[in-house]
Amino acid sequence: MACSWSAALQAASSSGGGNTALEHTNTQEFSISCHDVRDNSCEEYKTSAHFMNASGVGATCPDCHVPKQWVPKIIRKVQASKELYSHYFTKWIDTPEKFEAHRAEMDKGVWATMEANESLECRNCHEESHMDFASRNPKLAG
C-alpha cells in the first residue's frame, strides 16, 4: 500500500478539504499506510494491550500519538512533517535494521513529549479517578 499522503493532499485540494485531509491523517489506516510504520511499529503494537485485551477496548495509533485538542494537534502535525521528509527523502528508518538502530532516539523523543505534556494523549482515555489500583498488575505500577 502506498503512503496515504497523496490522498490527504488530494482531499485538501477539494472544497473544504483542509479539514478532511487533516482528519484523514488521524486514522489508523493512514498511520500504517507507510511501510516504515507498518513493517516496524505496527507489528509490535499488535502484541500490546492497546490492541488486544480482555475488555475488548483498543486504542489506535492516533489515539496515542495525536492530541485531540486542536492547537496541540496542529503542533503535532507540523512536527510530523519531519517524519514525512524522512520517509520520502532520507529514508532513515525504512528497514527493520535502521528502525532498530534509531529506536532509542525515537523512544526518547516520545517519552520527552509525554513528560512535557503530562501524558496528554494517555489522559484522553485513562482517568485516574476510574483506575482500580488494587487490581493493577504490580509490574505496571510506577
Image (cartoon, rainbow, N blue to C red):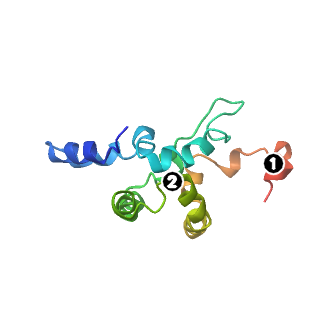
Tag 2: amino acid: Thr
Tag 1: amino acid: Phe
Q: Is residue 36 above or below residue 81?
A: above
Instruction: Point out residue 94 in the picture as x, y percentages from the top left corner.
Output: 46, 55
Q: Is residue 89 left or right of residue 17?
A: right
Residues 132 and 6: in front is: 6
Tag 1: Cα neighbours inside 10 Å, few (<14), some, or many (≥20)?
Answer: few
Q: Is residue 73 left or right of residue 47?
A: left
Instruction: Point out residue 6 in the picture as x, y percentages from the top left corner.
Output: 26, 46
| Residue annotated with mark 2 | 95
Secondary structure beneath dot 1 equals: helix
On-image quarter of the N terminus? top left
Q: Is residue 112 left or right of residue 38?
A: right
Residue at the spot 54% in from the left edge and 50% down from the top edge: 64
On-image quarter of the C terminus? bottom right
Residue at the spot 72% in from the left edge and 30% down from the top edge: 54
Residue at the spot 34% in from the left edge and 44% down from the top edge: 23
Residue 28 tag number: none
